[in-house]
Amino acid sequence: MKLTVTKDELNEAISVVSRAVSSKTSIPILNGIKLEASDSGLTLTASDSEISIQQFIPRTKGERFIIELDQTGSVVLPAKFFVDIVKRLPSQTIEIEVMDHFITMIRSGSSEIQLVGLDPEEFPLLPRLSGERVLHLSSGVLGNMIKQTAFAASVNETSAILTGIHWSVNQNRLKFVATDRHRLASCEVEINEQQEGYNLPIVVPAKTLQELSKILPEDQMIVDIVIEDNQVLFKMENVLFYSRILDGTYPDTSKIIPTVFKTEFTVDTKNLADALDRAYLLSREERTNIVRLVSINDSTIEISSSSSELGKVTEQLEIESFTGEPLKIAFNSKYLLDVMKVMDSERVHFSFTGAMSPIIITPQGSREVLHLILPYRTTN
Amino acid sequence: MKLTVTKDELNEAISVVSRAVSSKTSIPILNGIKLEASDSGLTLTASDSEISIQQFIPRTKGERFIIELDQTGSVVLPAKFFVDIVKRLPSQTIEIEVMDHFITMIRSGSSEIQLVGLDPEEFPLLPRLSGERVLHLSSGVLGNMIKQTAFAASVNETSAILTGIHWSVNQNRLKFVATDRHRLASCEVEINEQQEGYNLPIVVPAKTLQELSKILPEDQMIVDIVIEDNQVLFKMENVLFYSRILDGTYPDTSKIIPTVFKTEFTVDTKNLADALDRAYLLSREERTNIVRLVSINDSTIEISSSSSELGKVTEQLEIESFTGEPLKIAFNSKYLLDVMKVMDSERVHFSFTGAMSPIIITPQGSREVLHLILPYRTTN
């Protein structure tokens, strides 16, 4: 293998695939990035037990030459050092030449780097998916569905299935749900296609979806999603992203979401987020993160937290459209802050069925995104 | 104590004094910031065993009212929470009122925070310095002297005196020196005053001087420096910064700096820094940080590093004004990178007296700043 490639394109591709390089693996080949030069361009691949990412660099982009190919071939290079050194190379063009025993020369300007490469035959093969049934989502919609739900998934590996996001489809609506038993987040979207044959429901690790969302193209490009056996594949322009699907039975979450409410109101998103942030600061010191919410009257709520050592924070907030019974409830402020961070609407709607029942938070005027938080059972 | 103060000025003062709040102290009062309202304004003070910082907020700045005073008095508030909450308060004005038992109310917009304050009588008093002999330095000069030397001080507390910067004065030249036995940095400057009576030499902890340099005013303001007993005081506009002086005898470093050289050359600072950065990347993997420098001919040097596992980096660099014998030397690349980070001149001058003797690095055309690195004794 021998070629010359432009630095920016190589850097870009390395930064994408290196997300799949495990820092913890004991299998040396998985610490590497596989480079494969063919007549059409250069393909980079990295893989760990959860995800695999492959990026293709074409020989030309429009009129511009990206790669000058002297000889096809392939090699696996140590990812960490390769990532760090390519960023720092002095020239805009980088020559890569694989010699005997996979010793690889990288030349750029007055720098010459000799790397101990590994045999690409030892690199794991990517799953082969037939791709007969494909789900199409725009990168913006997919990114938002991940953002709205992934944070609510469990990080506790002992309940492995809850570390994933549950994907289901019902009456042409695709729905993502995540829960860690203390809170739940769901987001749904209409899909314009027939509902059969997508191999849903599945549960995809929230962590890998968060990695995916970091490399989703920003413009509203269509992402093709292929689900087969225990793998889901996201196809973007020049990028393939594979994730493992989690084994196990996801709990039925539909029944824990109340549909009749005793108290409801709407509040300004930013004002609430700021007030909550201050109350959280104090509640954090007590390690419980407990914040209390009390309705003062039809147009005011009070949020408060206290710490025996430090003192007390009290915040009054204007609310709108208050209906129902007076309210007094306590909850984990961190959970509500997490919700406020992903809330895009200017106003946010709260629904309650009592001090011991789930709190429902939705963007004003929409039920496509729904957040649920279980309250604390406190006596005062 | 009762007053109203503008948020920006309070935040600014808190961020300055909180640098002196120890995160490790077991003395609760030292976790606090002392607030003292007098007829002229509000004084904030924080203190740990190494440094004390006091910032004064005057009642007016020009035509603008900063503080509205209702009642003088003082209190000590828990620093960490106070710093975090003031940043997040909703209104541009903040009311602070101390009640019975030092319970303190902080009101801003719709927020009300009640803090458990402590008795200011328990807060340590600042040292009293007579300030008869004062050294005057511009903030820019003082900041640069710290930047050029502090990084070379030892971080090993077992040789406590080497964790400081040695200040001395000789023939109207003030000199800072720092060394950790493997390298040395010195910076000197002419002072326009008589040399007697400054109570020099002293050794000031490098860490506290680095803290000082972060709050030095950016414009070329004069800093008054008072040295007395075991304290040095830096007086800036509205800020007093006290540092402990280290006890002990500083080694005589004047004799280890060679004055006659066998090889000298000049090289472009940025090119060298970049090449070194790449060579360091590989040498780091070996944990030795060893980089080799070899003169190829009168106009070229080669910098290289190697790792048995990863490979080899080789960099060729153009040099100028080469004089003397051919050169082959090995050194810790991290030490030279640290020097390159503080090097302001476009070209840098190297002087050598052989493979086993100190390497001297100076900005081209100046000897006010001098860096010294001991080479590695290697056989190849």
Image (cartoon, coloured by chain):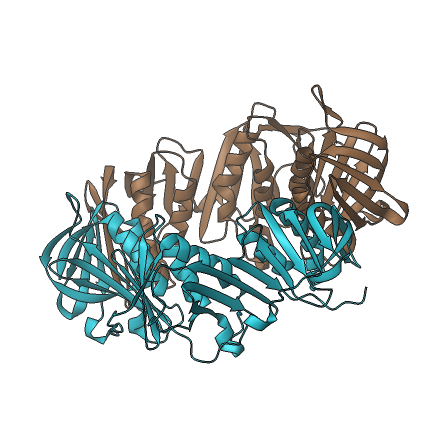
Chain colours: A brown, B cyan
Q: Could you say where residue B84 lies in the image, as x and y percent from the top left?
A: 33, 55
Of the pair B54 and A306, the residue shown nearer to us: B54
Of the pair A263 and B327, the residue shown nearer to us: B327
The N terminus of chain A, quarter of image: top right
Q: Is residue B270 above or below residue A311?
A: above
For the view shown, which residue lies furthest in the right direction?
A100
The C terminus of chain A, quarter of image: bottom left
Q: Could you say where residue B199 lies in the image, as x and y percent from the top left?
A: 35, 74
Q: Could you say where residue A208 lies in the image, as x and y percent from the top left?
A: 61, 45
For the view shown, which residue lies furthest in the bottom direction?
B248
Q: Could you say where residue A312 lies in the image, as x and y percent from the top left?
A: 25, 60
Q: Is residue B28 visible?
A: yes
> In the figure, is residue B72 to the left or right of B171?
left
Q: Is residue A334 above or below residue B183?
A: above
Q: Is residue A125 visible?
A: no
For the view shown, which residue lies furthest in the left direction?
B70
Of the pair B39 and A289, the residue shown nearer to us: B39
| Picture residue at 28% right of the left edge, 55% below the top | B13
Q: Is residue B64 above or below residue B335?
A: above
| Picture residue at 40% right of the left edge, 64% below the top | B172
> In the figure, is residue B115 to the left or right of A247?
left
Image quadrant where residue B37 sits? bottom left
